[in-house]
Image (spheres, rainbow, N blue to C red):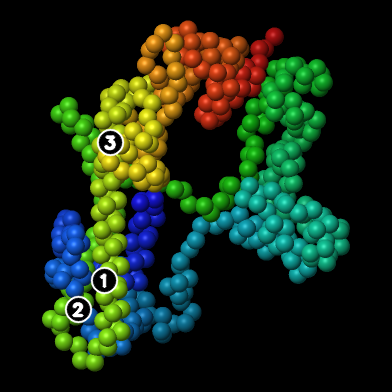
Amino acid sequence: MQLSRLELSDTVQEEIEQNPVLEEDTNNPDSLHESLQELTAEGQEPEAAAPGNTTDEVNLESPSGLKEINWEDYANEYEDKSAFKPQNDPDLPSRFDILTKKTNLSDHLQWQLKFTNINDQEEEVGNFIIGNLDQDGFLGVSDEEIVAATKSPVLMVQKILALIQDMDPPGIAARSLQESLLLQLAHLNLSTSTAGELVRNHLPALTNRDYAAIVKDSGHPLKEVLAALEVIKGLNPHPGRTYSDEEPRYIIPDVYVYKMDGEYVIVLNDDGMPRLKISKFYQDILKGHKDIPGLAKDTKNYIQGKLKSAMWLIKSIQQRQRTIYNVVESLLKFQHDFFEKGPDYMRPLILKDVADDINMHESTISRVTTNKYVHTPQGLFELKYFFNSAIARTGGEEALASESIKVKMKRLIQAEDPYKPLSDMAIVKLLAQENNIRIARRTVAKYRENMGILPSKYRRAPKLK
């Protein structure tokens, strides 16, 4: 129940590979496990299970049931069989030579290191430095630690470190953000520019957007400081991520909610999920319909256990899908205004409300709403998004959901004067005046941080004199 869609798919695929009784139904993908539903009927034991869909019988005359693959005879459909003859020409590349993986930061730097004129000990130092870079490209060890680990002279370590810091991507192998930015400016021949001076001497003030202090301390006019700031903004604070080998994670909805002819329709997403069935061959063995000479009792018990495991998995998946459907149906009832009009109309909702509505325990609702996503007319949301605490309102008006408050706060901040941004206390007062919302300043600060919005002093735009 708690597995995400991707984790469930991987679990099912792993079970198919490990459990010979469980098979993927590729012949009838539109059937919703008809034979499996019969097998998993309440109170029915595996021995008395109904027959499943017909499957190809496994040849038991071979110990493995499969012929050994002859790779010399293997060829892909798109290949020219007359041209590809690896057994006759060992100089041709192997099929496995064309398999590639995404280049990561370590691979990219080691590739550059091989083209430098260094000896074996210096290469060892370089590989040690590269191996101690984090995912952002920053070096996490000191010169002394590199010297001790590689038993190399200090001057050699410093030489190789400077060599790597001069590699692509710019700013790599720095020990701080300031050093990385300075390396990138040096790569652009801007070390002695105003931008370089600001990074060297005024980085804390830049971080706090204290432009008045920078102008006063540096002696540069505000216009020049702001121009240098634009250069600094173009630098990469995470140079190593340019060659990150992490694959993007795509969210696939578990369920869709469509509005058709004025009514909402809930559709579970079964795309990409294997259709499961029980092997008829093993069912016949257990029911005595197939005579296998010498079939040991232990073997029969093993098959019996695998059959129960397969049935449990199928019933669990069916229960999971039914529960997701019921939860979304309940959410649609409680949050109907949201589906109609958007986040402004989100209602306060807790797990107990849905649990009581569909007669389930709160812990089950918590598991089924974790890492599950629904596609709605208002966008894609995690199911947990629909549960919100209540924020009281004055004048006896109905309480609002916390998510609705966040939407109103974001709208106020987007409309603020950039030269006079709203403080958290000013937002408190505006919410009270415009929506009769009673909320504490610290709550506004917490919501603002959750939305990734900076405090007012960091949102203020500088005025050019």
* Residue position marked by numbered label 3 in the rendering: 357
460 w.r.t. 63: above or below: above
Instruction: Report the mark closest to the observer, 2 or 3.
Output: 3
Q: Quadrant of the C terminus?
A: top right
Residue 418 circle label: none
Question: Which residue: 60% across, 60% down?
Answer: 107
Question: Which residue: 43% across, 24% down?
Answer: 390
Label 2: which secondary element: helix
Q: Are marks 2 and 1 in contact (CB under 8 Å)?
A: yes
* Residue position marked by numbered label 2 in the rendering: 286
* Residue position marked by numbered label 1 in the rendering: 307
Q: Quadrant of residue 230?
A: top right
Q: Where does the image place residue 12, in percent across and percent down from the top left?
A: 33, 61
Residue 164 is at least partly visible in this image: yes
Question: Which residue: 68% across, 59% down?
Answer: 131
Question: Which residue: 27% across, 69% down?
Answer: 308
For the residue marked with disc 1, what is the amino acid? Leu
